[in-house]
Structures are given as C-alpha cells and as structure tokens.
Image (cartoon, rainbow, N blue to C red):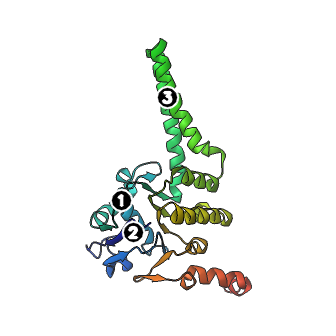
C-alpha cells in the first residue's frame, strides 16, 4: 500500500543546512512508487536528513527517549521540514513511527523510566489510599506494568539486535507508514535477513509503507523496492548499480585485491 505518494521539497538559504546539501538543490519533488522505498548514499548525502525531516512533517511518533518535537538534535531540521509539501494517495494513515537505530537505547531507558514512575505511583497509592480504592488503583497500575512486559519483555536482557527486532515486531501495525533510519547498525547479517522477511511480509500482506535509509545491500534487495540514490542529485537506481552493492560484491569476491591498497 502506498499512503504517501509524493513530496515537494522547500527552497531556502542555499548556505544553510540542510538546504545546502547538494542532493536537495535540484530536487523539487520525489514520487513514491512502491510500498518500500530505500534511500541510499554516502554519509552526509542527505538520505537520513530527508527521512528525519519527513518524519517531523507527517508528525510520526518517534521510538526513542523523546518525541521529535522535543528532540534538540533536530532543531536545524524544523524550517526545512515545515516547508515540505506532502500528497497522500486516497487517504492519510495515522499509524506509524520513526525509528533510528541509535535511539534504541534511549527507548529502553524510557521504558525503565515509565516502570519506575509506575512503581512510584503504587507507593503513593499505598500511602494515601486504603481498602477497595487502594485495590483498584494498584490493580490498574499493575495492569499497565504487565501490558508493557507482555509487549516488550525485558529489553535489558537481550542483545541490541534482538531488542531492536522485538521493538519493531511489537510496534508495527497493519496499514501504517514506517520510517526507519539505518537499522543495519543494530543488526547482524542474519538479523538483517529477519528484518528483510518482516518488511517484505508487512508490505505485501499487511498494507504497510516503508521508507528506509540504509547502507545494507541486503535491505536494498527487498522485492520491488524503489531505490533512491543520493549524491549530487536524487535519482532512481537498481540495487546492483549502487556503490554499496558493487564494493561489497567485489570485496567478497577478491578481498586480497582490496587489502593490497589498504
């Protein structure tokens, strides 16, 4: 399912970040033609910048330690984000989220903070309530704690990659739009394949739309993915035309040839 069909990028001070990114200077519009769009390019090429700005524009909740509107690291993106014009196909979905690999640990801390707050509420109730009122209030808090435990388990007892996949499995719903920034930073090749399978199934069978920024040739190979290359422009490419795929393939075929020059 394609919910977000097209975006028009704003113009601004060409010397001011992120308007100064070369890929954005000649980019007026970007069409989304597949339920899976993959942004690829070198560090600093603008793929993650556009993903974050787009998440802010469509007001997606962020999985992390704080919401996007309160995230001080995104201050420079706000003017750029506000200027983006979006076009939705048939209807806009209000399901979805924005998730950066580096925000995982912030999300774990957020869950722990919520758990501590709930424990504090129980202590307060035990001091100020009694009888049936106490039972009802504590029962409600215990219900919230148990719901979080069922949904996420104890993320402090699993690896970064296992927890990352667990959070995605717990949060993704059918008919949503999901913006994910460099998930491979948390994942082994085997876990990348697990994510590959999850995204493929959700896009094909659960009417989900994904926009992913990645350096992973595995994720670039998602079936029917629209791959957008960020360099001096933004243009559509095939997976075997990306530098990531070519370098990885050539290195694995003949690592000695690379090592002689490193």
Element under label 2? helix
Residue holding disc 3: 141
Q: What crowding class fits label 1: few (fewer than 14 Cα within 10 Å), some (14-19), or many (20 or more)?
A: many
The Cα atoms of the two marked residues, 2 and 3, are separated by 39 Å
The Cα atoms of the two marked residues, 3 and 1, are separated by 32 Å
Q: What is the quadrant of the N terminus in the image?
A: bottom left
- Does 84 sit left or right of 73 as displayed? left
For the point 62% across and 42% down, the residue is 154
Query: How far across and how far down the image is residue 164, in percent?
Result: 58, 54
Closer to the N terminus: mark 2 or mark 3? 2
Residue holding disc 2: 50
Query: How far across and how far down the image is residue 99, in percent?
Result: 48, 57
The Cα atoms of the two marked residues, 2 and 1, are separated by 10 Å
For the point 51% across and 51% down, the residue is 171
Q: What is the quadrant of the C terminus in the image?
A: bottom right
Element under label 3? helix
For the point 58% across and 72% down, the residue is 216
Residue holding disc 1: 56
For the point 52% across and 57% down, the residue is 102
Q: In this rendering, which labeled residue sits more in front, label 3 or label 1?
A: 3
């Amino acid at each position: 399912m394609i919910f977000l069909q097209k975006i028009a990028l704003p113009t601004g001070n060409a010397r001011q970040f992120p308007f100064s990114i070369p890929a954005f200077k000649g980019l007026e519009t970007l069409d989304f033609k597949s339920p899976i769009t993959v942004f690829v390019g070198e560090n600093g090429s603008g793929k993650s910048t556009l993903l974050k700005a787009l998440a802010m524009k469509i007001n997606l909740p962020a999985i992390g330690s704080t919401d996007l509107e309160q995230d001080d690291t995104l201050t420079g993106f706000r003017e750029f984000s506000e200027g983006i014009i979006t076009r939705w196909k048939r209807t806009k979905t209000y399901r979805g989220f924005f998730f950066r690999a580096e925000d995982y640990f912030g999300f774990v801390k957020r869950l722990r903070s919520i758990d501590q707050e709930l424990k504090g509420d129980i202590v307060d109730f035990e001091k100020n309530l009694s009888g049936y009122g106490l039972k009802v209030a504590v029962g409600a808090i215990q219900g919230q704690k148990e719901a979080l435990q069922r949904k996420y388990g104890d993320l402090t007892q699993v690896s970064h990659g296992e927890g990352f996949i667990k959070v995605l499995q717990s949060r993704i719903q059918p008919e949503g739009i999901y913006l994910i920034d460099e998930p491979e930073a948390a994942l082994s090749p085997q876990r990348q394949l697990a994510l590959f399978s999850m995204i493929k199934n959700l896009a094909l069978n659960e009417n989900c739309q994904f926009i992913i920024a990645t350096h992973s040739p595995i994720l670039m190979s998602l079936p029917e993915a629209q791959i957008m290359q960020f360099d001096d422009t933004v243009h559509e490419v095939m997976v075997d035309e990306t530098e990531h795929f070519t370098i990885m393939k050539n290195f694995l075929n003949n690592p000695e040839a690379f090592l002689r020059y490193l």
